[in-house]
Amino acid sequence: MQERSSVSELAKSLRDELDRYSPGGKLPSSRALVERYKVSPVTVSRAVAQLAAEGLVVTRPGSGAFRAQPPASVPETGDTSWQEVSLSGDSGPEVVPRTVDASGVLVTLAAPPPGVVEFNGGYLHPGLQPERAMAAALARAGRRPGAWGRPPTDGLIGLRDWFAREIGGTLRGSDVLITAGGQSALATALRAVAPPGAPVLVESPTYPGMLAAARATGLRPVPVPVDAEGVRPDLLEAAFRATGARVFVCQPLFQNPTGAVLAPGRRERILRAARAAGAFVVEDDFARHLVHEDAGPSPEPLAAHDPDGIVIHVRSLTKITSPSLRVGALAARGPVLERLRAIQVVDSFFVPRPLQEAALELVGSPAWERHLRAVAAELGRRRTALTAALRTRLPGLALPHVPSGGATLWLRLSGPETEAALVSAALRAGVAVAPGRPYHCAEPPAGHVRLSFAAVSGPAEIAEGVRRLRAAWDELPSRGR
């Protein structure tokens, strides 16, 4: 059983039994719970911590866990209806609404119920995360002199230099800012280069988190279609002319969700189109380390061949390590770097130094390259297993492109089945998939679902997940049942 499922199930069992204890009563010891439920001490510790976070138990170091005292009184419920008027105060003919819709992001962040196969996840399964290497790096980092002091606002020099070398070209560490992950970097970049109400050109389909960040800033996403070779330059040029946009956001390597890699013949044309429009290109290079073992050499980032500062490059360590290692980078040249720096300082001051020190320890250790090789091999195997299972059991789901990197497959509904109906039926069958609608900023051309093969435990769970997805498919009314 997965550790997360074990923790959830044990927490539920303990929660159900709390009525047996009077307020202040002591719960069984950790050793007793380990023996009773046949779980690990870590599982017990995490389950008790979950109940403590819910306010149901109180833990006392050296004494154990105790049922919490009930609250003295139920706080009075206030009237928050006035907020509807206040929050809509920015509406009007000259103002772009800033309503924030995070539903497309939450699909990949929220953990599914216990026992559900997680095809909708956005991060590596715990079994693929370098937990031992990260723990060792954090321990070493914590012992560094000054590790708990205030870091430079731009980030540790050594970490900025490392990111600059990773991006390549003539970039230097002084061109790099350390950020709290890729999502934060994207939001900062969008705020820096486009005023509220301005259009921003985006790939279609594209990453829902970027769309949410753009809309929260008051920007108007304008779709530019993607095919198997990445964004179409002819349509990008037309979109620049039609909208007057001054920014284009793209993922040239293993694009999310399609997995497409921007073709060599299109790369320079895209930069020329942006240069002619006086526009920036925000390059989200989130999947640089998610290349599969059987892939050929990956193209260099657009930023590596951009002396004129057209490209603002976004990079993160999160996808290849852990959702909690939120360390990323923004790289840019020219006056825009100062604006990026100012926005980041105002928003967050700096990324916590212990996290930066741990990241620097991790990427400089021998375990780092071993981890990259292991993930490359395992992601390739999982992609192959998922692709084969889908083609065998679900030929009604079209798979136009099999990527050589990234962690997902983008499937098109080829019949009259509705996307929402399939997603709902899948969850009833015990498998969570991501709907395609949030990946489009306008009406989608067809129904889609996105399946992640990184968040599951391995080939056996992939096979079980596809079996459940087939059961959901057969349940749909359009299948003639």
Image (cartoon, helix red, strand yellow):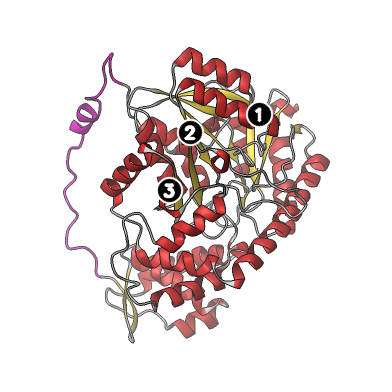
User: Which numbered marker is on residue 434?
Assistant: none
- The picture quadrant where one finds residue 138 is bottom left
Instruction: In the rendered view, tell whether residue 353 sits above or below residue 89.
Output: below
User: Which numbered marker is on residue 266?
Assistant: 1
Q: Nearer the viewer, residue 395 or 80?
A: 395
Magenta residues (range): 69-95
Q: Where does the N terminus fall, quadrant-wise?
A: bottom right
**Amino acid at pointer 2:** Ile
What's the distance in space between the residues labelled 3 and 2, CA to CA?
13 Å
Residue 400, position as x, y percentages in the image: 74, 32
User: Which numbered marker is on residue 310?
Assistant: 2
Q: Secondary structure at mark 3?
A: helix
| Mark count | 3
Left-right relation of 351 to 206: left
Neighbor class of circle 2 (other Cα within 10 Å; few <14, some 14-19, many 20+) is many
State the predominant SS element of the stretch in magenta: loop
**Amino acid at pointer 3:** Asp
